[in-house]
């Protein structure tokens, strides 16, 4: 948390989504044992995203529909390891808000609202190196960058960005 903020940088869900995808596998060339490219486009029928303003009972998220694009490039090198690059982009539109309703006089269990009216976009970019040791052990290092921009119809817009770094050991059976 930066400067003591309690802002949750991102949270997103694709509860019901479908769409086409392509997986391309290229032939082995020299020490490049595997090269694979994946691209998927999905229509999100029901999704959820972090809300900065809507907080009723235990719910602090908006629901809506939208789309996502996902891509992954996987390179595997003989006797060395693998390099993976992933990118994900989500866009969710919340169509029906609670604006104009007095929440103090309405039973929130029966409130017909998806959350705060507006739309949210979330992007994720990840790179990962995995280095093979002799035998079944490998070490990995990954970095991820996340950004969120939520545009609200009746509240100020919110932007958030964060990153993470992961280090790990893997035992392959």
Image (cartoon, grey):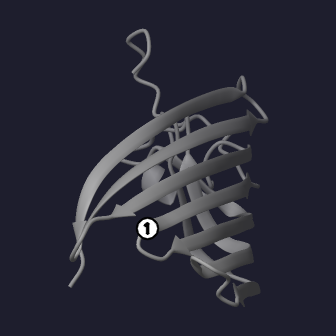
Location of residue 151 (image quadrant)? top right
Tell me if residue 115 comes above or below residue 75 in the rendering. Answer: above
Tell me if residue 37 comes above or below residue 108 in the rendering. Answer: below
* Residue 62 screen position, x and y as percent: 58, 51
> Which residue is located at x 41 percent, y 73 percent?
79
Location of residue 135 (image quadrant)? bottom left
Q: Which residue is mark 1?
A: 81
Tell me if residue 104 comes above or below residue 130 in the rendering. Answer: above
> Which residue is located at x 70 percent, y 46 percent?
120
Residue 41 seen by the camera: yes
What quarter of the picture does the N terminus occupy? top left
Location of residue 134 (image quadrant)? bottom left
Q: Is residue 96 left or right of residue 59?
A: right
Most foreground residue, 149 or 23: 23
Q: Residue furthest front?
A: 30
What quarter of the picture does the C terminus occupy? bottom left
- SS at circle 1: strand
């Amino acid at each position: 948390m930066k400067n003591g903020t309690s802002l949750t940088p991102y949270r997103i869900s694709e509860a019901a989504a479908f769409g086409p995808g392509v997986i391309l596998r290229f032939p082995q060339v020299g020490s490049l044992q595997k090269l694979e490219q994946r691209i998927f486009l999905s229509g999100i029928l029901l999704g959820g995203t972090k809300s900065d303003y809507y907080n009723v009972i235990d719910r602090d998220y908006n629901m809506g529909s939208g789309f996502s694009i996902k891509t992954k490039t996987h390179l595997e090198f003989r006797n060395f390891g693998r390099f993976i690059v992933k990118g994900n982009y989500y866009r969710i539109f919340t169509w029906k808000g609670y604006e104009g309703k007095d929440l103090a006089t309405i039973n929130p269990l029966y409130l017909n609202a998806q959350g705060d009216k507006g739309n949210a976009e979330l992007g994720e970019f990840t790179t990962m190196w995995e280095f093979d040791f002799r035998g079944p052990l490998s070490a990995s290092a990954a970095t991820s960058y996340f950004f969120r921009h939520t545009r609200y119809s009746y509240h100020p817009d919110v932007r958030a960005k964060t990153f993470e770094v992961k280090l790990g050991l893997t035992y392959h059976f």
